[in-house]
Amino acid sequence: MNIGDLVVRRSYGGDIAFRVEDLRRDEAVIKGTEFRLLADSPLDDLVRVPYAPVSEKTEKANIRANESLSLLKRHRQEQTQRNQATLSGSGEWGTAEPAYFEVPGKVLHLDGDPNYLKKSLSLYEQLRVPAEGHYVNEAGMADALYRLLPRVRPDIVVITGHDGVLKHRQNHDLYSLNSYKNSQNFVRAIQVARQFERHYDQMTIIAGACQSHFEALLQAGANFASSPGRILIHALDPVYVAAKASFTSVRDTINMTDVLHNTISGTQGVGGIETRGSYRIGLPRLNDLTKLKVTPSAI
């Protein structure tokens, strides 16, 4: 067994694929390839596989991911049609190109997993969401935000990585932050972000990972968090919520039922509070300055 190997767990029926992150005597630290899960496992429980198996759980997640992406794209098309209809009434429409320009909400995404961060940034780009991403260990996220927020000044902050209920804690007291691997680190990061911007509608915070302490994250100041049912969440769930926030108009609140039911993990994976969107349109359409003929007037 080597670091980087793709493996499944015998004891769980090979339902989720993992990458070996670290080796410790007779145990391995493993990270989910599709779910934001960090775990340890005895080496004799791991089976090396040449490719990620498509289990029923993974297949359902992939179907949901495709559905969620399709819904986001449909939302964008409908939004464009609404903008067109609104501007046509004011005489601003009538050309082949949109008569307006768009200012979607800007995302600052901190992720405790470099592979998930890469996937997330790729999806932001595909959805045309302006985003800046940083790979930061969960324990360092509060300090990272303290440095990054004044420079980036995002509309939306995503704080995610790996989490989980610690199996060695007796009775698994789900009310205690000490029962979770990284929820207390997420709480500290949220608190730093809320000290920077206290208004929930000026900066939307999306926080948490698999089995995170949902209630503590909301109490610390998150608008959306995982995981109400302490379940595994899909790697791209935070991206879906961030994209919805980025392209929901500042005049509207994010459709809670729509966003939560259409995340890959569903309402037991992600929850939140009523929040305004960050998307704006501007007039007139931005010009191509390389084609603009201007007579200089300054000395």
Image (tube, helix red, strand yellow):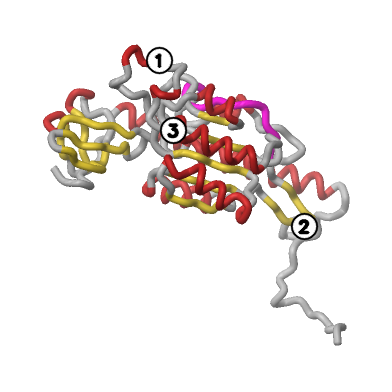
- Magenta region, residue range: 267-277
Q: Which residue is mark 3?
A: 209
Q: Nearer the viewer, residue 197 or 113?
A: 197
**Which amino acid, mark 3?**
Ala
Q: At x 13% / y 42%, what residue is drawn? A: 1
Assign the magenta stretch its main secondary structure: loop
- Relative placement, left or right, of 104 versus 269 is right
Residue at the extreme top: 171
Whole-percent x, y for residue 296 in the image = 83, 84
Do the numbered discs 3 and 1 sit on residues whose CB atoms are within 8 Å?
no
Q: Residues within 10 Å of mark 2 (few under 14, many from 20)?
A: some
* Residue 161, visible in the rendered structure: yes
Tell me how far mark 2 sits from mark 1, CA to CA: 56 Å
Is residue 168 placed above or below 187 in the rendered structure? above
In the image, which is nearer the foreground, mark 2 or mark 1?
Answer: 1
Q: Which residue is mark 1?
A: 173
Q: Which residue is mark 2?
A: 99
